[in-house]
Image (cartoon, rainbow, N blue to C red):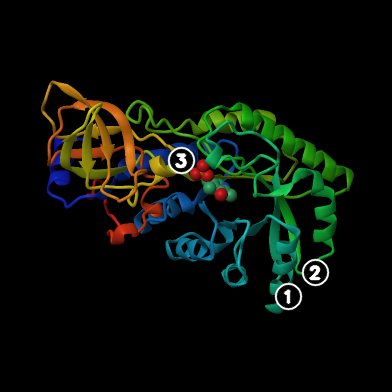
């Protein structure tokens, strides 16, 4: 829902662009902080969801940590005010250069995904006379019941170390001089709305801890990753995800030993609803079964529908018509997959109308590309504070 004042600003601004609602972001962060503080849980924002400088600065000002998946993300997080000792760094393919950078910046923890990676981190840390703190990213073999493109916790996924190898991996880490094992890490997928996978994750984590206890090992950190979903269908009714419900469930199901700290890495749930892609309709082209509404935004601006078949609610903000028609909203890119939605009932739409692609704050702007030599979309907050 946008005020007339904001819609007027949209009308005066060249499209396509991202609009971020700073107030909603702040409300979301307040809600998350309250839910996490209730149990002393530590939150790291998953930078890959949106690395916009303003957004990172707002999030870091709340004292949250950062979850990074590349050296450049680690650097950008530090540049935007995240403290190095609150940064966790995951990824199946960390390069030597990235590992060295993270060691230099003194990050809190490497979330490691293979034995060979542990070996490399050990030797690079030894070269610069440091001891790297690491957590083992375990693949818990859990189906997060989400889109298969963003399901990461199944045994055939490239992510993590199979939980069956826990014992061998721990023994191996203990043989490394410049690596210190501080925790276990999990991340089972994204856009998860069903709480059952999280309950199973707690169970799996409890089993892993039990195993470690039998080996007389206790680790101070346990990181359950991110993945909480948002309501793409009804962004106005549910603008803020139910962090409390998830964290209450974790509290009830996760066994935590004295002194042990619990971490999360939320991305989408923090930033998705505050972002909207704003676009203008260039042309209307009637076809046999539908009408094409050709927007000036394409998958180079928002790739989720083309990449995962994802849904974004699309609204015509300027049509005054009481009548509706059926539209396929498509972009200008020279690819048949450049379709945002098919068969959408929308008020009669004309050239020049402003379209809002809702819930686009996560995995939107950051995935923009220059294919077709298009411009990267700009972003605006319109100082709504
Ligand atoms: C992508 C990712 C996240 C964040 O996932 P969301 O679904 O955006 O919350 C957290 N942890 C890791 C390791 C990730 O790769």
Dot in front, 3 or 1: 3
Q: Which residue is labeled 1 in the image?
A: 126
- In the rendered image, the residue lying farthest to the front is 288
Q: What whole-number distance in Å separates the C-alpha atoms at marks 2 and 3?
A: 43 Å
Residue at mark 2: C-beta within 8 A of ligand 1: no
Query: Circle 2 sits on which residue?
Result: 177
Q: In the rendered view, does 212 fall on the left or right side of 162?
A: right
Q: Does residue 224 appear anywhere in the picture?
A: yes
**Residue at position x 19%, y 24% from top?**
325
**Cβ of mark 3 under 8 A from ligand 1:** no
Instruction: Check disc 1: other Cα within 10 Å, few if <14, some if 14-19, many if 20+.
Output: some
- Name the mark on residue 308: 3
Q: Residue 152 location, x and y as percent?
A: 61, 43
Viewer-side label of 2, 3: 3
At horizontal 62% and vertical 26% (from top left) the residue drawn is 196
Closer to the N terminus: mark 2 or mark 3? Answer: 2
- Tag 2 near tag 1, CB within 8 Å: yes
The part of the image, by quadrant, that contains residue 322 is top left
Measured as percent of width and height from the top left, residue 51 is found at: 42, 55
**292 shown above or below 112:** above
The answer, for residue 37, to whether it is visible in the render is: no
Name the secondary structure under disc 2.
loop
- Please report whichever mark, 2 or 1, sits nearer to the chain's N-terminal start: 1
Kindly state the secondary structure of the residue where label 1 is placed: helix
Q: Is residue 83 left or right of residue 373?
A: right
């Amino acid at each position: 829902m946008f005020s007339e004042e904001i819609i007027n600003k949209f009308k005066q601004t060249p499209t396509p662009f991202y609009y971020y609602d700073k107030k909603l972001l702040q409300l979301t962060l307040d809600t998350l902080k309250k839910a996490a503080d209730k149990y002393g849980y530590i939150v790291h924002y998953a930078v890959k969801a949106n690395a916009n400088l303003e957004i990172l600065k707002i999030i870091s000002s709340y004292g949250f940590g950062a979850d990074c998946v590349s050296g450049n993300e680690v650097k950008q997080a530090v540049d935007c005010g995240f403290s190095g000792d609150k940064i966790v760094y995951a990824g199946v393919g960390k390069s030597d250069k990235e590992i060295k950078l993270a060691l230099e910046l003194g990050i809190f923890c490497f979330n490691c995904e293979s034995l060979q990676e542990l070996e490399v981190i050990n030797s690079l840390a030894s070269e610069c006379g440091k001891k790297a703190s690491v957590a083992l990213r375990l693949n818990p073999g859990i189906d997060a019941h989400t889109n298969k493109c963003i399901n990461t916790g199944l045994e055939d996924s490239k992510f993590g170390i199979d939980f069956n190898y826990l014992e061998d991996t721990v023994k191996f880490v203990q043989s490394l001089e410049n690596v210190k094992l501080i925790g276990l890490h999990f991340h089972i997928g994204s856009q998860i709305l069903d709480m059952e996978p999280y309950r199973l994750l707690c169970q799996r984590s409890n089993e892993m801890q039990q195993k470690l206890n039998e080996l007389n090992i206790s680790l101070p950190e346990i990181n359950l990753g991110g993945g909480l979903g948002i309501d793409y269908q009804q962004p106005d009714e549910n603008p803020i995800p139910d962090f409390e419900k998830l964290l209450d469930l974790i509290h009830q199901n996760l066994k935590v030993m004295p002194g042990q700290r619990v971490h999360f890495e939320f991305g989408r749930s923090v930033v998705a609803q505050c972002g909207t892609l704003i676009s203008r309709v260039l042309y209307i082209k009637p076809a046999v079964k539908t009408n094409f509404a050709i927007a000036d935004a394409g998958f180079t601006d928002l790739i989720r529908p083309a990449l995962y078949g994802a849904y974004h609610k699309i609204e015509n903000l300027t049509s005054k018509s009481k009548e509706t028609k059926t539209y396929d909203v498509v972009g200008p890119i020279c690819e048949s997959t450049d379709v945002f939605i098919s068969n959408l009932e929308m008020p009669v739409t004309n050239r020049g109308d402003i379209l809002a692609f809702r819930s686009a704050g996560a995995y939107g702007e950051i995935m923009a590309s220059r294919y077709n030599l298009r411009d990267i979309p700009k972003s605006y907050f319109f100082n709504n504070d």
